[in-house]
Amino acid sequence: MMIQKSHSNREHLLESMRTLSTELDYQTVLQSVISVSSKLTNSEVASILKYEEADGHLHFLAAPWFQKDSLQSLRVPIDESIAGWVYKNAEPLIIQDVKEDERFYSEVDQAVKFQTNSILAIPLLVQGRCVGVLEAVNKANRAHYNGEDALILETLASQVALILENMDLEQRITQMQAATDRLEQMKKDFIAIASHELRTPLGLIIGHSTFLREVIKEEHHEQLDTIISSGAKLKEIIESLANVENFQSGAASIRMMKFSMANLIKQNIDTFQEKAKKKSISVHTDIKTPNLLLEGDAEKIGIALGNLLKNAISFTSEGGHVFVILEQIPGYAKVAIIDDGIGIAQKDMPHIFERFYQVGSHLTRQHGGMGLGLSVAKVMIDLHGGKIWAESILGKGSQFAFLLPLDRNQINAAERVFDTK
Ligand code: ADP
């Protein structure tokens, strides 16, 4: 008879464990654990207590429905309770008559108008560390809790411990996510305020220096040119910061117009001719579709193209070559900027389009910039429903290419995606 009973208990336990592991909602699982615990140990009630660092007490995490409300706000002290003893010593405990045990904390009974006689309490262990206690209370007919009851509860406790660990991890992830969101917001605010506050004085510096250059003697032109070009560089950095922020927050939109990609490439190359000449870099073009008209925001595409061209020239040594190719492929216009410059290591490739990312080698550090050029280029192209990517071999050169859709519907769809961000 006894053998049969323990056999059916084991079956019940296994069945319960199977059901519990398929349940997704933690609270439901914990409630099921306590009802299975009391059923399989033949107890009146069962409950789960969890240690809270914040107040150094045990809190009821799961209790029978008729006790739940009263127990929710109750705090069980570690030093004056049976559960506290089990928690502190990380050892199971059976008390046959709690009235005889000075560790018994009677306030729980008073709160729920209940009378506890016997207790079986099992520690909840996560990687050897006790995080709480699973209790079964009042075995039926005043019977004694035995080894089998303890074994059943220990098996269930291991399941509960896993759940508590998961709950803890999820809570930590949520807290970290909230901290990350706060930082992201602070960063956005900082960029918005800084770029706004810097723009006005910088505009005045550039404006007044340009005026001064007109009216003072030629011997001072060089100094003023330095002020003006440094001011322009600062302005560029501020614009880049604001650009990425505006596009990522959806504050920017594109102004659609028809434009010639071939002309845009030509104008852009013209602005970099002087820089290229200084390094004896030749810039070649291969325009396969000179009459191709695209619809999009020419100014923004021009910024993307300019950043790629600027990089190609900056990261190519004296006497090097830069090629710009325009062609039409099914559904898209493709622009490729190829250089035979210093190239990019494979380990850096996944990051180059990230904001503020710069390849940390001493070779590249001599170049100015803030690691914004490619991230700005990417948002401009993304905004048009396009695609931008790079291929590179260290020491040999790089190819940056982007696609722009020929169908304006795709551009509008891309803009809608950005608007909802
Ligand atoms: P920055 O504005 O500082 O140049 P970018 O976002 O434009 O930053 O580029 C990020 C990094 O990618 C650069 O610091 C550089 O190391 C690398 N890079 C970009 N373009 C090229 C290129 N054509 N050749 C080699 N390295 C490049």
Image (cartoon, rainbow, N blue to C red):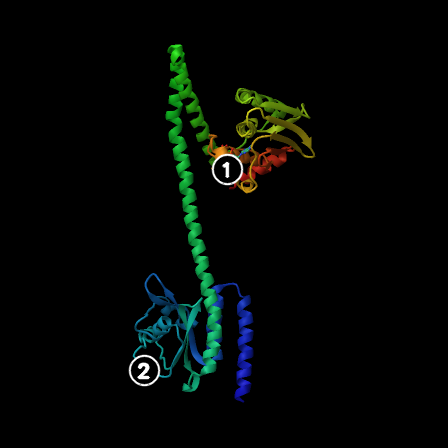
Q: Can residue 223 be seen by looking at this rendering? A: yes
Q: CA distance from mark 2 to mark 1?
A: 72 Å
Rendered residue at 47%/78% (across/down): 151
Rendered residue at 43%/52% (across/down): 176
> Residue 208: x and y, percent?
38, 18
Furthest-right residue in this view? 330
Q: Nearer the viewer, residue 400 or 419?
A: 400
Residue 71 found in image quarter: bottom left
Residue 122 found in image quarter: bottom left
Mark 2: amino acid: Lys
Say if disc 1 is inside 8 Å of ligand 1.
Answer: yes
Image position of 314 with respect to 184: above or below? above
Image position of 289 with respect to 76: above or below? above
Determine whether the residue tagged by mark 1 lies in a helix, strand or loop. Answer: loop
User: Mark 1 packing: few (<14 Cα in 10 Å), some, or many (20+)?
Assistant: some
Q: Which residue is mark 2?
A: 99
Furthest-bottom residue in this view? 1
Q: Which residue is mark 1?
A: 359
> Residue 59: x and y, percent?
37, 67
Which is closer to the viewer, label 2 or label 1? Answer: 1
Q: Nearer the viewer, residue 285 or 410?
A: 285
Q: Nearer the viewer, residue 49 or 211?
A: 211
Q: Are marks 2 and 1 in contact (CB under 8 Å)?
A: no
Residue 142's disc is none
Horizontal side of residue 8 vs 101, given as left or right: right
Mark 1: amino acid: Val
> Residue 336: x and y, percent?
62, 31
Horizontal side of residue 23 vs 115, given as left or right: right
Rendered residue at 36%/73% (across/down): 89
